[in-house]
Amino acid sequence: MSDSNEDDSALPTGVERRQFGGESRLVTRGEPVYGEPTDGDWRCWDARRSKLAAMLEHEMDTGLQGDETVLYLGAASGTTVSHVADFSGATYAVEFAPRPTRDLLDVAESRDNLFPLLKDARKPATYAHVVESNVDVVVQDVATRGQARVACENRQFLKDGGRLLLAIKARSEDVASDPEAVFDHARESLKEEFEIVETRRLEPFHTDHLGIVAVPR
């Protein structure tokens, strides 16, 4: 591996671009989690396995600077949230399914700032007593119907001026509908609680996904 000459000034502190096998890749510094390529303490952050990494690859205006307090909704087994915890402050990881939560607990063992929560992101009242108020960032990757509604219901945790970084999966909303129609409906639903800063399709990394950056109204 060699350092890349690419400008990474738009990336949060703790995230860099480096060359692996002649390809520029995002990297964070932390314990490996999912068999990702590593060199020393650096581990590749695979945008094909992470919607947030895809948003960074597309240079979306995430507002991430590093050391933020993060509420991560839909943490699964910890692929993306492990990278987030590598460069963030306190990171609350909400996951509904018990099996991936067990893997998430293993990921958290080497990350003192990562707090797994076996909870349903559609029911924020069940973890409101644990998650501190006024978090800097809400990251959401929840494969369920009503993804925009989930974001609106979790608005309560986000500080004024904070950021919502949301990945909408069209097929989780309606497998039969045109993805653009699904995305339009999600944008309209978000406007109840958020002002949208930027949207972008996440191809080629993720098919029929829309990345959304928004701020609370």
Image: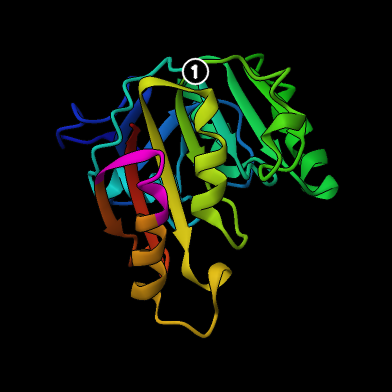
From the top left corner, tell me how far across and down residue 92 is, in percent. 63, 25
Q: Is residue 116 above or below residue 172?
A: above
- In the image, 179 versus 125, the foreground residue is 125
Quarter of the image where one finds residue 173: bottom right
> In this rendering, does residue 24 appear at all?
no
Q: Is residue 216 above or below residue 26?
A: above
Q: Residues within 10 Å of mark 1 (few under 14, many from 20)?
A: many
From the top left corner, tell me how far across and down residue 51 is, in percent. 44, 51
Q: Which residue is mark 1?
A: 69
- Tell me which segment is drawn in magenta: 189-197
Quarter of the image where one finds residue 17: top left
Q: The N terminus appears in which quarter of the rendering?
A: top left
Q: Answer whether residue 147 is magenta in the image.
A: no
Identify the residue at horizontal 66%, vertical 14% (top origin): 112
From the viewer's perspective, tell me whether residue 165 is left or right of residue 201: right
Identify the residue at horizontal 66%, vertical 42% (top origin): 121
